[in-house]
Amino acid sequence: MGKISPVSAKYIVHANISIEGVVDRPDVIGAIFGQTEGLLGSELELRELQRSGRIGRIEVDTETKTGKTKGSIVIPSSLDKAETAIVGAALEIIQRIGPCNAKIEVEKIEDVRISKRTFVIDRAKELLRKMMDTVMPDSQELADEVAYSVRVMEIQEYGKSRLPAGPAVEESDEVIVVEGRADVLNLLKHGFKNVIAINGTSVPEDLVELGNRKVLTAFVDGDRGGTLIVQELMGVTEIDFVARAPDGKEVEEITKKEIHKALRSRVSAEQIKMEGMPRDEPRSSERQSAPQEQRKPMQKPQQQMPSMPQQQPQDREQPRQRPVPSLSSSEKQTFNEMLEDLIGTRGAYILDEKLNILGKVPITELQTTLKSLNTGVYAVIFDGIIDKDLLSVAEKSNVNFIVGMDNKVKNKASRVVQLTVEDF
């Protein structure tokens, strides 16, 4: 009687057997062949299948305890999965083995190829890992690895706060202050070694002490978070200049050209205090300021700063002189439908006077978009909360209506009509 090699088997039938009595292994095998004979037809006769090698050796393992026999049956098969399932189901018709009642239940049909495929994948991963460790990499990989290693080696820890810093912080008269370790790495990569990171939300004492001895340039991201860091630095230590990454970009991801351009365009901290820039003002306002206005802070900075609170109320009152627009019923219905459409999207619709959608942008880019459009925006509908900064940008862009999910502005007196879900 031929038998199938376990190597060529595609499926293995696993079955459990429970017998009400004591029987031997040959009794079980005899019952399997005898009671299934003629049941499945000549093509699926177990004896013929085993003789042709399509069914392997039937393995039976039994154990007798307290007058009862339990065990397992294993049948390897090279049949297709449908025929193998039929053979497995045929085992369950056996109800008696010798003089004893018996019950056979097929536990599972194992696909041998799956386990082989798993082995192949695991072994391939291991071989690839060894190959990457031993095979010579190409020139680009070598260059990248060396450059990264050099950058990491150059990073030092400064002061008691162990701030990430470049190797030339103590040697240089000017120091660039960035937000985190990744920013330091990017600047080191492009040749700037006089860099130090705040490494957190609070300004450490080491940086305060450094500001008393050296010229500090705050180099921050081009977003709202960068503006807040500038405000915090100015309130704690002596910041001489401020540079910003391009709008919407972070210092850690900008290119060498963008770094040089941002540092060349840096402005003095005194000018920022005078112009009130820590509100994400467009940089064009810096370039549009008259030369006489730039000279005044340099001549009498102490006298000029107290005069700002007197000018700001006048600037804020000018937009309120314009008539407050009224909301028609059709506009109210349109706004409500668009607001419901935006729920959960964190997006914003920008509309013109005919209520046509000029565009849809993420709310993170809403303020930047309004600044770039400047005029021609009739209404803004967005899935977010109305705050003071957004309202200020909307006023400068001559927006008539701003519709959001909620409103955090305490003083709602503005020419811009502010609406929320509760108003609909």
Image (cartoon, rainbow, N blue to C red):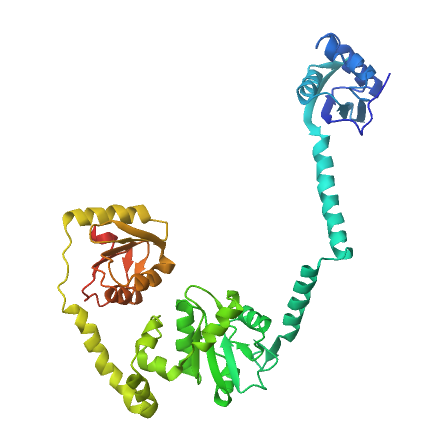
Q: Position of residue 267 (x, y in %)?
A: 40, 79
Residue at the farthest bottom position: 299
Q: Position of residue 275 (x, y in %)?
A: 31, 79
Apparent side of residue 2 relative to residue 281 in the rendered image (left or right): right
Towards the viewer: 397 or 65: 397
Q: Position of residue 382 (x, y in %)?
A: 30, 54
State the count of labels.
Answer: 0
- Is residue 202 something one can see in this rendering? no
Quadrant of the rendered structure where residue 71 is? top right
Residue at the farthest right position: 1
Towards the viewer: 212 or 220: 220
- Is residue 147 something one can see in this rendering? yes
For residue 162, above or below residue 212: above
Q: Position of residue 392 (x, y in %)?
A: 27, 67
Towards the viewer: 168 or 40: 168
Q: Quadrant of the N terminus?
A: top right
For residue 45, above or below residue 85: above
Apparent side of residue 65 relative to residue 142 in the rendered image (left or right): right
For residue 330, above or below residue 7: below
Apparent side of residue 51 relative to residue 85 in the rendered image (left or right): right
Give the residue at x 36% y 79%: 272
